[in-house]
Amino acid sequence: MMIRGRAAYASMLLIVAGCAKAPPPPPTPTPVVTSDTSERSFDEAVNVATDALAAQLQRGPAPSVKTDAKRGVVIDPMVDSVSGQQTATTHLLEQRVADRLASNHQFEVMPFQIANLSKAQYLLTGTMTRIPSSQSGAPPVFQINLALTDLRGGSVVAQASSRARDEGLDTNPTRYYRDSPVVVKDKVVDGYIATSQTPPGSPADSVYFERVATATTISEATLAYNNESYQDALALYQTAAARPGGEQLRVLNGIYLASWKLGRANEAEEAFGKVVALGLSGNNLGVKFLFNPGTINFWSDPQVSGPYGFWLRQIARQAVAAKVCMNVVGHTSLTGSAPYNDRLSLQRAAYIKQRLDKEAPELASRTKASGLGFRENLVGTGTDDARDALDRRVEFKITGC
């Protein structure tokens, strides 16, 4: 059960400070937000935003723990703010920011591990968001948002933004997100994103901040998965699941992925059922069913579509167990005309509904199909590959019965 209010922050403070009594929060600084709207090269944009964070700390009050040593910073892995994914570019952003901070005599960048939460003073979060360019006819740019949160007080002490031109940046998702069957974006990820945009003097999002200790284990587990150390990843995700606040899409999805990679089909199906149940409970379930181009036939490669049978079985079972009514919503990528994609997305949603009705006939009267074409793309590149796979998802939206 999630702890709320003052009790939640007290619990979090004990976790990160490792002491019996949390020190008082630092004085509230005068909000100073640095938002640079110039469109720069990626490296220049990173430097502008990172340097702005350091400058704000120099103008603000002293840190909550006074020391002559460098100020310790841990970085929770950065994400794309629309999809919630980690990509090659968000990883590059994280590396560049870390390098820039490390070159500043004020800071020591420490690994994002639970032991370092009691040693570091600041938590750094960061996002990238694809937005229209301010220059007519120019391609979209990326807005970078960075924020530093005081680990003892839970308040954002510095926030800065800048804009980077997309000069061939690699937006392919990392292995975990590429392999994920669902859109891994829940209230915790939303809270991370919100924190990265929070002005100084305001508290970090509580849903996110209360779970930072668990986030360190999730980060280690995801790194192990990306390195194809699936047994280690599974153990770490299971450890995260057993911790307070561990019931998250990232965790349950990780258990599914690692189990499937290890050939544990029954465990994988059980884990996917938990992913579905959590997604339906929050009305936030988007599944990446991939189809052959222009058809309602699942992708021909069994390495991709092999588990689709038990995905459908678990979606049907969990929907029946939850006694919900659903709108099955099809989406397509940004390729082809709008009318064509509207029809195709509806046809694919209708096919998924048909398969669900076959699995659980009682769903026939409790589900309907609709198509949105590419009107709600999460990526919007129209590349029709791993980079925009989320745009070709099928969503299951809870409706009134």
Image (tube, helix red, strand yellow):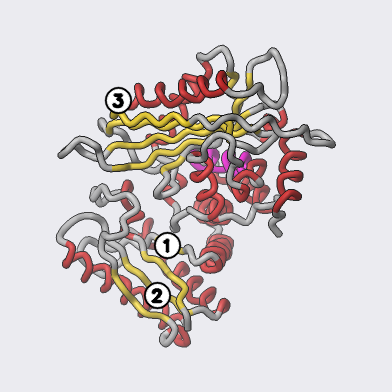
Using a 10 Å C-alpha cutoff, classify the residue at mark 1 as few (fewer than 14 neighbours), some (14 to 19) or many (20 or more): many
Dot label at residue 41: 3
Q: Is residue 259 left or right of residue 360?
A: right
Placement of 389 over or under 131, stated as above or below: below
> Residue at label 2?
327
Residue in view at x 66 percent, y 21 percent: 62
Mark 1 belongs to which amino acid? Gly
Q: Which comes before the other along the chain, label 1 or label 3?
A: 3
* Magenta stretch contains residue 145: no
Residue in view at x 30 percent, y 33 percent: 169
Q: Position of residue 175 (x, y in %)?
A: 43, 43
Location of residue 182 by image quarter = bottom left
Placement of 344 over or under 8, stated as above or below: below
Along the viewing direction, whichever of 291 and 189 lies nearer the viewer: 189
> Could you tell me which secondary element the residue under label 2 belongs to?
strand
Which residue is the extreme one toward the right?
20
> Could you tell me which secondary element the residue under label 1 belongs to?
strand
Using a 10 Å C-alpha cutoff, classify the residue at mark 2 as few (fewer than 14 neighbours), some (14 to 19) or many (20 or more): some
Location of residue 93 by image quarter = top left
Dot label at residue 286: 1
* Magenta stretch contains residue 217: yes
Which residue is the extreme one toward the front?
30
Mark 2 in CB contact with mark 1 (< 8 angstroms): no
Q: Which residues are magenta?
A: 215-226
Q: Position of residue 382 (x, y in %)?
A: 23, 50
Q: Which comes before the other along the chain, label 2 or label 1?
A: 1
